[in-house]
């Protein structure tokens, strides 16, 4: 019999573990992009181990124990596809939209930054997906607690957009004041740089008397114009000269694609639309997650192979042979796929116990991503006071939102298939 988590404590533990894993793997892909690895190569590596994680979870947990009536194991359900194909299609549709979301997110991270991209996408996922899951789950979550949390995520969408806009102005202001930028004709700034932006002083910036001892060979400090130019020179996706609306457009496109996958898994497992014939067992979590991951892998793999020869966003073209020979940072991309695969599986396991609406608290993963963004990539370093205030407000909303959504967790009542059949026969009689 497949393993199922039934108590709220176990569900919360799984959700927290999922939050940590799902907040970390985007940082690994961003790190590779900033080290000049092509996003097509990175995604292909990522998709392989992401599928591998789904297979391991399905076989390890979905095949454990003996099969009982109404709760088939993983391999049994694979052989029943002629009966449960409607649920399989729903699970695969969820994997497809998530695959597109991850595909676009690679470019959104480059243009809008890791923190803002994940915050807006996660907020859209919660606002749309949690509302749908609340009604699909038979309202097992407390509405008076759940929807204030959803409102916090909705506010975070607008605050996140303001943070991106403010931080972009800060960067443009730094570049407009940089001697390197003035001398480099290849660097193009947008025309709406604010001359009134007041940046926080750099406590480590050399004073006039110290400038003579500053060597160009010194490593640029995060948050400086030199650092921004240094990153731009190394990365595979060039962002200088692009309008800030391009980044926000990619972010919202990513969020739109990613906001429906949780609801699709919910429908595939619980069949609230009664697409299956009577007597056909519902998909167990691990079978649905397997089909979900297969669909995500197939779509992502095919699209990225096409992107190898027809790249977007100014990324250089490549070939299958070049991808096979590219071992630069491959271990990080493979690790990112494992983290994402196990993170998604832990999220879905927690959702079955606590309710899909409450488990969407895992979308507070930008709290983790923001930490990695500041530590690894120097995001928001030496920015304006306005940017710091907006960033603090955005993170505060996320802390409140995740606490409220987890507090709304309900208890999913298990229904034995045989008992349900007997009650149905009695009612018919």
Image: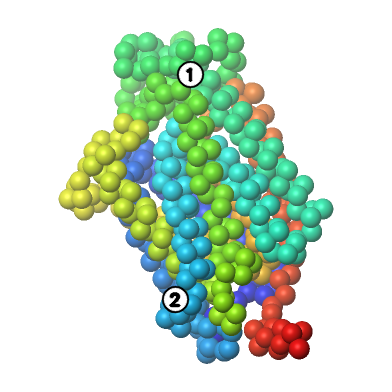
| Above or below, 265 relative to 400 | below
User: Whole-percent x and y of residue 393?
Assistant: 69, 35
Secondary structure state at the residue bearing disc 1: helix
- At label 2, counting other C-alpha atoms closer than 10 Å, the crowd grade (few under 14, some 14-19, many 20 or more) is few
Q: Image quarter for residue 262?
A: bottom right
Of residue 399 and residue 62, the one placed in the foreground of this image is 62
With respect to residue 348, does 402 lie above or below?
A: above
- Looking at the image, the residue that sits furthest to the left is 321
- The reply to whether residue 133 is in sight is yes
Q: How is the image coloured?
A: rainbow
Q: Residue at 33% across / 49% down in the picture? A: 303
Among all residues in the image, which is located at the extreme front?
A: 429
Residue position marked by numbered label 1 in the rendering? 172
Q: Where is residue 11 in the image (x, y as percent from the top left)?
A: 65, 67
Q: Mark 2 points at which residue?
A: 81
Q: Quadrant of the C terminus?
A: bottom right
- Say whether disc 2 or disc 1 marks the residue closer to the N-terminus: 2
The residue located at (44%, 32%) in the rendering is 111
Q: Is residue 212 visible?
A: no
Q: What element carries label 2?
A: helix
Vertical relation: 359 (above or below) 228: below
**Disc 2 to disc 1, how far (Cα)?**
55 Å
Q: Residue at x 31, y 53 (%)?
A: 302
């Amino acid at each position: 019999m497949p393993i199922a988590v039934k108590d709220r404590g176990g569900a919360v533990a799984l959700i927290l573990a999922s939050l940590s894993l799902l907040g970390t793997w985007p940082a690994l892909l961003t790190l590779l992009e900033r080290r000049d690895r092509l996003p097509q190569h990175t995604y292909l590596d990522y998709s392989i181990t992401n599928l591998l994680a789904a297979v391991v979870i399905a076989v390890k947990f979905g095949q454990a124990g003996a099969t009982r009536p109404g709760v088939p194991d993983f391999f049994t359900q694979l052989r029943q596809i002629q009966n449960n194909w409607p649920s399989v299609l729903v699970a695969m549709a969820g994997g497809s939209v998530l695959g597109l979301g991850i595909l676009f997110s690679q470019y959104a991270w480059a243009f809008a930054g890791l923190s803002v991209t994940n915050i807006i996408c996660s907020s859209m996922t919660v606002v749309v997906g949690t509302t749908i899951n609340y009604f699909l789950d038979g309202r097992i979550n407390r509405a008076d607690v759940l929807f204030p949390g959803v409102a916090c995520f909705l506010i975070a969408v607008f605050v996140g957009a303001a943070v991106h806009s403010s931080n972009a102005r800060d960067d443009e202001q730094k570049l407009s004041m940089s001697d390197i930028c003035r001398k480099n004709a290849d660097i193009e700034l947008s025309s709406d740089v604010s001359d009134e932006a007041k940046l926080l002083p750099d406590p480590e910036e050399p004073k006039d008397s110290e400038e003579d001892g500053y060597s160009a060979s010194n490593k640029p400090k995060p948050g400086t114009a030199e650092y921004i130019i240094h990153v731009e020179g190394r990365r595979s996706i060039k962002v200088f000269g692009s309008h800030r609306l391009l980044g926000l457009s990619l972010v919202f496109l990513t969020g739109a694609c990613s906001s429906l996958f949780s609801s699709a898994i919910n429908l595939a497992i619980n069949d609230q639309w009664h697409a299956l014939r009577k007597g056909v067992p519902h998909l167990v979590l691990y079978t649905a997650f397997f089909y979900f991951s297969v669909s995500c892998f197939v779509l992502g793999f095919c699209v990225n192979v096409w992107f190898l020869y027809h790249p977007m966003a100014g990324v250089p073209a490549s070939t299958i042979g070049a991808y096979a020979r590219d071992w630069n940072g491959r271990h990080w991309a493979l690790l990112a796929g494992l983290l994402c695969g196990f993170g998604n599986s832990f999220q879905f396991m927690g959702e079955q116990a606590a309710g899909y609406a409450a488990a969407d608290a895992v979308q507070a993963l930008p709290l983790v991503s923001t930490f990695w963004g500041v530590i690894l990539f120097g995001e928001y370093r030496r920015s304006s006071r306005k940017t710091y205030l907006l960033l603090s407000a955005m993170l505060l909303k996320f802390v409140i939102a995740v606490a409220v959504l987890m507090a709304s967790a309900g208890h999913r009542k298990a229904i034995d298939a045989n008992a349900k059949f007997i009650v149905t026969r009695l009612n018919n009689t």
